[in-house]
Image (cartoon, grey):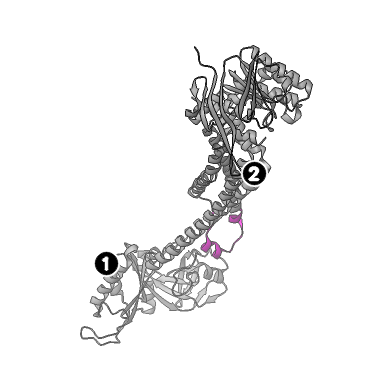
Amino acid sequence: MTEPLLRLSGVTKVYAKDGAEVAALAGVDLDIDRGEYVALTGPSGSGKSTLMHLLGCLDRPTAGSYRLAGAEVATLSPDELAAQRRKIGFVFQSFHLLPGATAQANAALPLRYAGVPPHERQDRAAAMLARVGLGERLRHLPRELSGGQQQRVAIARALIAAPELLLADEPTGNLDSRSGTEILALLEELWREGRTLVVVTHDDRLAARARRVIRMLDGRIVADERR
Amino acid sequence: MISLANAWAEVTEPCREAWAVRRRLLPVVLGICFGTLGLSVLLAFGDGFAAAMDQALQRAGDAMLRWSGGVTSRAHGGQPAGRALPLLPADLERVAAAREVVAASPDAQINGRVIADVDERSANPLISAVGADWAFIRGVDLETGGRFFSRTDEQERRRVAVIGATLARQLYGTADVVGRTLRVFDAPFQIVGVLSPRAQMMQYGGDDALKVLVPFATAQAIRGLRTCGYVLTRLRDPANSSVAVTALRALLAARNGFAPDDLAAVRVVDHAAQAGQIRGIVLGTRWFLAILGVLGLLVAALSVANMMFVLVEERVPEIGLRLALGATPAQIRRRQLLETVAVVLLGGGIGLLLAALLLAALGQLPLPADARNYLGTPALAPATAALIASLLGLAAAFAGRYPAARAAAVMPVEALRHD
């Protein structure tokens, strides 16, 4: 039997806050297979964003084991950790684009750290932006784009290195309903192409579109429904 | 393996990103610029001053001992105390033959009246009766077209003279007087050379620029000179002048019958040792100027480090994002360091350029010749520029290291927490 793409065993994350320890995650066990479409949902402070940060190797657990594609994340060196992150596409609620860089340069950023030559980066970024419907906006700065367009740039950036795993943290949270629907449709299209998609949301309607819904409360998984 | 294009992008992209925050970095660039300018100008002044002083010392006889006769202070060898001992031509011959000495010359100074062949203009300068090696011992230069006395001039007791540039202008209205006639000791002398103006250091008997020099043998013939006045000796090893003083004093003591440790019997002024002391002071001054300049540059480097720390703190979200997108800590560190290096080299480059322009302009200022002779002409020597460039490299490494380490230590999740 093949190991799941993501496997968390007894993962705990504790923060120090005002001299006291706060457990954002308390002994989470979770497996996510390749090709799944998972919604992580729950109220604010339930630990869903903390879990996504751990899944994306953006943070380290305080205790427990996290294996990503068979590798124990806690034992990885900084360079190996960076290499793992290059296999993950991130889509953030507030886009996190570099304000001084064009749409094309923002989309090309992960390729810079993957050692791809500059001219190839530009070509691939242009192609990816065309795919998300921004082929005419290559030279635009983020401030010259609408919220929906900025999120499309972020999706282009997430996809450019052809990652196996897409992590989206409230991807429609800062968008109007029409833009949100379009972005969600785009993400689901990418999932249908075979990528693993994990969406963090507190929106039940959005979560209902996923094939698997994991509900969190007080740092624990309280429900795991498959459809 | 990083391709050439990637390596070029690794260098140029931080520079472009630094350009994006140019208004924030401008004060830092200016700080480094003025720090470099200050250091460059101070070092250039130090170089120019040291070169001028070195030249002045060479032209003042920096390898010279100046002997003069004295009076014995105690009885010795059957001779009573209080015996006057003027230095004679025989003493000169004795010291000239010593192995510590490479050249020797008398320098008998006589006050007298001289009359030019132009409008009967006259003056009462100091007239020095010297030997052919005097110019070599003193390290003096002559104006173009002139010459110093030769041995033939001495042997044939020719009536030739060399005069100081200031005296030449007083008498003739010009320093171009070679070939003119000057009456000295009521006899016509042909001027064969004019002493070049120079900084007067360790002088004796007044300013050389106001003197008339004639061959000692000629003065002997006309004036019946018996004593040498001073005996000037150029040493083979000026660094060990005290050893030479002891040896030569012993030699003169043996010839004249006084105690070698009777310092009043013959007196000596050790110009070589004085020159060494002055060079030590000049070296100390250069170090002082260099330390002042380096401290200024250090302050500028600290301001760079401070600003880079501030920028790193402001960029934590951006750095976290880059790490989230796959950057390694080493790439983040390198990028931050390159930005600092770019800032320091830009400021330093502009500072060096401004220093070169300022020093070139200073070189064109119509300063009095005396001031120029003492202060020299400050100029940015290639070695000094290379030293400053090395210091800038060190400053960049110093200023960039800790902000770069802070940048590399950012956790990617911080990018999202700043959201």
A19 lies above or below B111: above
Q: Are marks 1 and 2 on the same chain?
A: yes
Q: Quadrant of residue A181?
A: top right
Q: Position of residue A168 (x, y in %)?
A: 65, 23
Q: Is residue B5 visible?
A: no
Disc 2: which residue: B25
Mark 2 neighbour class, 10 Å CA radius: few under 14, some 14 to 19, many 20 or more: some
- Residue A123 appears left or right of B68: right
Secondary structure category for the residue under label 1: loop
- In the depicted view, which residue is nearer to us: B94 or B54? B54
- Residue B309 appears left or right of B161: right
Bounds of the magenta span? B361-378
Q: Which residue lies at the image location 74% right of the left edge and 18% below the top edge?
A: A182
Q: Position of residue A145 (x, y in %)?
A: 75, 27
B337 lies above or below A40: below
Q: Is residue A69 visible?
A: yes
**The magenta stretch spans residue B413:** no
Three-letter amino acid code at the position of disc 2: Leu
Q: Position of residue B187 (x, y in %)?
A: 45, 75
Secondary structure category for the residue under label 2: helix
Q: Quadrant of residue B278?
A: bottom left
- In the depicted view, which residue is nearer to us: B290 or A128? A128
Disc 1: which residue: B98
Labelled pair 1, 2 in contact (Cβ < 8 Å): no
Q: Quadrant of the C terminus of chain A?
A: top right
Q: Which residue lies at the image location 53% right of the left edge and 62% below the top edge?
A: B375
Q: Earlier in the sequence, mark 1 or mark 2?
A: 2
**The magenta stretch spans residue B366:** yes
